[in-house]
Amino acid sequence: MSEESPDDGGIDRRTYLAALSATAAAGLAGCGGGGSGDSGGDSGGDSSGDSGGDSEQDLGERVPTVSIGALGGVAGASNIEQANLHIRDQLESALGVPSEVAVKELTTYWSEVYNDARTFSFSVDLSPPFPSFLDPDNLIGPYHISYAGANGKPNTSNYANCEYSQKVEAQRAAANPEEREELVNEAAATASEEVTPITLVTNTVAGVYRTDQVNASGIGTAGVAARNPEFLWESEPIDGTDQLLVNMTPGNIPSVVYQNTRPATPWVGTVYMPLLYRDKDYELAAGAAESWDVEDGFQTFTFNLRDGMTFHNGDPITSEDVKWTLNWLNDNSDVLSSINSFPYESIETPDDTTVVVNMESPQPPYINAFIPNWSGVLPKDVWVDAGAEENPKDPDLEEIIGSGPYQVENYQPRQLLALSQYDDHWIDTKGGLTFRGYSDRQTARRAFEEGSLNVLINSTTDTNEQIKQSLGDTAEVVTGEAFTSWEVRSQHSFAPAMFTEFRHAVSQAINRQRMLSILNSGQGSTELYSSFIGKTHPWRPPEDMLRQIADSPQANPETAKQILRDEGWGWDDSGRLRYPADKDLTPRWPEDSTPCDNPEGFPCLPDLCE
């Protein structure tokens, strides 16, 4: 999720329902794909039988109460809760399914999703517009079948489809860009056909800085954000201020093992310097490597390091440190949840400033998706002495020694990361940098208005309006439309969300125009097609390859009902939705297991279970 923090005020149910528009108020089996059949029918249909017209003898058991997980303690948490409340109300009013919203703290939410805890069926979320997501592998890769199930891997829907996974693997090994684009499109089309995900609206991002404390520079397309290192490096604290003071979600500064966080900010590009980074316009730029070459159809990657670089303890940064960092990340991809592994054939260090990475097969995502985000160079000797090879998640570091333009002055997990300029660095920053953790947006807004923050990242339209009223021209707001989208993520491992037709019906019942107001204060645009890749993303598949999952931006409850009727679902005399009589409600794999733990009941890619 995003980097700023929300308010934690509750939502008054009657106030919320009164604000709804009149319209809004009114399978997967083995490698076969999506559930036990799909409607394919988007026709309207009437509502006869919703409260007694369907014969109960032809129906199965009632659909139980559906739980919806709302992510708390992050930017826009109150907006996310409102969006989930809308899903709840539409499930109840349009589909006859009793529902509840459960707000969950960041780490609890991710732990339950990554370990297939089956505590909720739906949640509203998005992939943040981090530069790493400009490579499609970071958007489609986490939904590979090997990431589904109770294994701590970031498959946020526990989506498992062999055809999809084969396409994901194939695009990672494509020998040329054209072949890779075709495979990415085919993978996205496979997931789209199964209504994975339920895409809602485009995402918008905004940041604010105080003109009386900051002479801003390096904003570019990436904007006022911690994910934009050039903004941090180039902006100058002024008028007696010697620091950029930036808010941060507490969950994003929990550990010095920066690879274990999701995402890697605020460590990468500040304390640790990657070989390459994404600049203010999201272009690939030279970092610790002043130049690089890609050869042999994405199989050989050569990085030429800058001369004279040092870690914060004064030791030289050498190719051996880079080699160790890359191998350590690869060796521990199973415990560092957000790290992808790669088939290294060898990593060579012909001299102190040259690193040659040889792959066993073509790896086109490596240079764009992995290197800019996860290759902050670590001091080998320090981390080995701290036991990082034996205990990668919690090395015993006496101090944090980095390779970036800032060095650590004070670190308090989840609260504070205070950095000063590291003078012996080729990047000449303009002052210090401090990230402070805020668990709610209003506290962060007040801190900004009082001057104890001078940069507010991931702000909302409402927050910006409050700030402008309070500070006038002293506050400069920078906004833009992101390349990722808000979506409803459905849990594919258990009923009812594991059925494609149910997900499709839920999609049709949602009022996307209302969601645009809730999530973006009316900015951006609605999404009517299912896609992991947002419609402003450079890798967005052609529209004719994607499934349209909503007839219009408004709620389409009659279409939603007809989709279910066409597949044998119905309603009893109390208006409660019931499964078809012959519906197999068995979870797609046993609880507390991964799909590959149960290859007889759930076929998977042959090489995953060896």
Image (tube, rainbow, N blue to C red):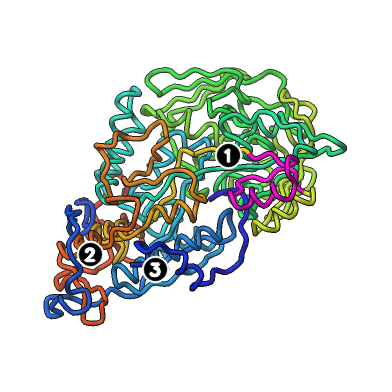
Q: Amino acid at mark 2?
A: Lys
Residue 19 falls left or right of residue 530: right
Mark 2 and mark 1 lie on one chain; the one further toward the N terminus is: 1
Where is residue 58, by image quadrant? bottom left
The residue type indicated by label 1 comes to: Thr
Query: Is tag 1's residue or tag 3's residue first in the polypeptide sequence?
Result: 3
Callout 2 crowding tier (Cα within 10 Å): few <14, some 14–19, many ≥20: many
For label 1, the residue is: 479
Numbered badge on residue 89:
3
Q: Is residue 527 visible?
A: yes
Q: Is residue 574 left or right of residue 395?
A: left
Badge 2 marks a residue whose secondary structure is helix
Q: Earlier in the sequence, mark 2 or mark 3?
A: 3
- Give how far apart the Cα atoms at labels 2 and 1 are: 39 Å
Amino acid at dot 3: Asp
In the shown orientation, is residue 66 left or right of residue 163?
Answer: right
Tell me what residue is drawn at x 58 percent, y 56 percent.
74
Is residue 19 inside the magenta stretch? Answer: no
Residue at numbered disc 2: 561
Residue 398 in the image: above or below residue 242:
below
The residue at the point 37 percent across, 64 percent down is 22
- The x, y position of residue 309, in whole percent, is 71, 24
Residue drawn at the location 20% of the way across and 69% of the way down: 47
Q: Can residue 277 be seen?
A: no
Q: Which residues are magenta?
A: 453-477
Of 470 and 560, nearer the camera is 470
Question: Residue 459 at x, y = what percent?
Answer: 61, 48
**In magenta stretch: residue 474:** yes
- Circle 3 — which element? helix
The vertical placement of 435 against 296, above or below, is below
